[in-house]
Image (spheres, rainbow, N blue to C red):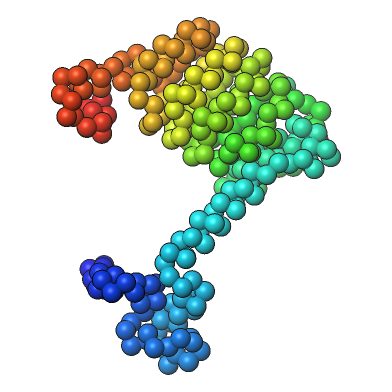
Amino acid sequence: MTAAVLGRWAALSSRGTVGAYQLLVPHGCWAHSDSSKLAPGHWAQRWLLKLYERFFDIENLFNWSIAFRNWNLRRKNGYYGYTQRTYGIYVAAAYYILQQRGAVRFAGQEEWFRADGRGKFSWDFLNLKDVPLEAVDASGTLMTYDGMENLVCLKELKYLNLSSCPYIDDWCLSRLYVFGDSLEELELSGCPRVTERGLVSLHHLKNLKRLGLSDLPVVDNRGLVRILLEESLPQCKIVGIEYEDGLLQQTLLKQDPELSTSSLKSRQ
């Protein structure tokens, strides 16, 4: 089946007429421009014709999908100004994180407010509007630079978990300086957009006691980064990277410049 589809794609692309309709709908149905005129047949043919009337080709379908994803991302990371004015900054920040399917904990409380698998959560945190928000677990969420506007007002924040967040980058890390007097634990493991530049900006977090940095794919000189961070944050425990990380790669490159970066990482 896959070979047949690819073969049709190649034949049509050579004529410059590739489209979702021509690629997926049988040749005998091409003459039908209106699905209502299509002779009774398989439901998939009628559905594909309907789809083609809305999305003229695969490129338009992909563009629509990307536009919708970007719109949804902006919607989820909007500024909760009305909630702040009505319930205060702590409730607004908690609501933003819970909407992202994260978790929060207020000062003096042992219980975490956490969204379940369907995004549902308890509204009891509304009773804590005057209690500072002390811990935020945003791991795996779609938080962006704009969404962090809902958190920068949390002057008492001690714990922040941003691990495995696909949109957390160096610009986001540059905003963390506002937690310089309070933040004690920061987790950045598994963030694919974080580089050395963003990690260097963490020197403002003078009270930081633990920093998680494992699985950062675009950070090359990890051992050197650890040394620099320990110099700027002497009281902080760096976990997830070792001194020799990256040094072995540089040594092998000097010995054999033709080695690829991917093969070196696989050796490590």
Please state the horizontal and vertical placement of residue 238, each as a whole percent of the image. Answer: 46, 15
Please state the horizontal and vertical placement of residue 185, each as a whole percent of the image. Answer: 56, 20
Q: Is residue 115 left or right of 34 when viewed as pictured?
A: right
Please state the horizontal and vertical placement of residue 40, each as a whole percent of the image. Answer: 43, 91
Q: Is residue 99 left or right of 41 when viewed as pictured?
A: right
User: Can the viewer see residue 167?
Assistant: yes
Q: Is residue 31 left or right of 61 when viewed as pictured?
A: left
Tell me if residue 261 comes above or below residue 236 in the rendering. below
Residue shown at 18% from the left, 29% from the top: 259
Residue shown at 70% from the left, 21% from the top: 156
Residue shown at 60% from the left, 43% from the top: 101
Tell me if residue 200 comes above or below residue 5 in the rendering. above
Q: Nearer the viewer, residue 82 or 129?
A: 82
Q: Is residue 249 left or right of 222 when viewed as pictured?
A: left
Please state the horizontal and vertical placement of residue 10, each as a whole percent of the image. Answer: 25, 69
What is the quadrant of residue 214 in the picture? top left
Residue shown at 46% from the left, 61% from the top: 62
Tell me if residue 125 comes above or below residue 240 in the rendering. below
